[in-house]
Image (tube, helix red, strand yellow):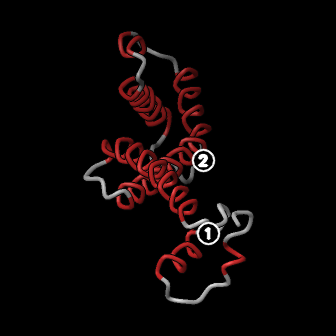
Amino acid sequence: LRSQNASFKGVEGARKFVSRVVDLVEKCSPDESLQKKPISLKHAWRWIKSIVEEYPTLKKTTESIDENRGILNRVVAILKAYDKTEVLERAEDLVIENEKLYHVIRKVKHLYRLDPEISLTELGVVLDGKERVNESSFTRGYK
């Protein structure tokens, strides 16, 4: 202990400090057995040291949890779910609808004798009839 900077004076002050540290460890420890029997200063020091050593890991874990919470909130908004419990149900519905749309698009391409590899944008152009499209580039293999 630094004698000039210490807030307590002498041996009695040191005893009070040690007693308070041990009491704090007993009260804060999740281990109920520590709360039932007196603990030593050595044990209290080990407990405090382990908490301080674990702090960086706990801080990273908390930051990761916060990041995941942000991602989940964004997914909730994108899926237009009312709360987080709806996310899986909405995602499953979206996958099912996506599969149905895939089959419909395949059928439309087949009906129009279009190349099955054309993009949705190209398919949209053909269906809208907005532009004259070089038919040969879209009907590859179907003539």
Q: Nearer the viewer, mark 2 or mark 1?
A: 1
Question: Dot 1, how many residues are within 10 Å of its Cα: few (below 14), some (14-19), or many (20+)?
Answer: few
Quadrant in which the C terminus appears: bottom right
| Residue in view at x 56 percent, y 28 percent | 45
Which residue is most to the right?
141
Q: Earlier in the sequence, mark 2 or mark 1?
A: 2
Indicate the quadrant where residue 141 lies: bottom right
Across and down, in percent, residue 58 comes to 54, 42
Tell me if mark 2 has few (under 14), some (14-19) or many (20+) residues whose alpha carbon lies within 10 angstroms of its own. few
The amino acid sitting under disc 2 is: Arg
Q: Circle 1 sits on which residue? A: 119
Q: Identify the disc placed on residue 36.
A: none
Secondary structure state at the residue bearing disc 2 = loop
Q: Is residue 135 left or right of 111 when viewed as pictured? A: right
For this orientation, the residue located farthest to the front is 143
Residue 95: x and y in percent read 46, 47
The reply, left or right, for residue 129 in relation to residue 139 is left
* 68 versus 43 height, above or below: below
Q: Nearer the viewer, residue 18 or 27?
A: 27
**Kind of residue at disc 1:** Ser
* Spot occupied by residue 10 in the image (x, y as percentages of width and height): 49, 38
Q: What's the CA distance linking mark 2 and mark 1? A: 75 Å
Residue 2 badge:
2
Count the numbered circles shown.
2
Taking the spot 44% from the left edge, 35% from the top edge, the residue there is: 17
In the foreground, 56 or 67? 67
**Residue closest to the far left:** 82
**Residue, x 59% and y 33% (percent of image)?**
49
Nearer the observer, 101 or 83? 101
The answer to which quarter of the image holds residue 38 is: top left
Measuring from the top left, give residue 123's x and y in whole percent: 55, 72
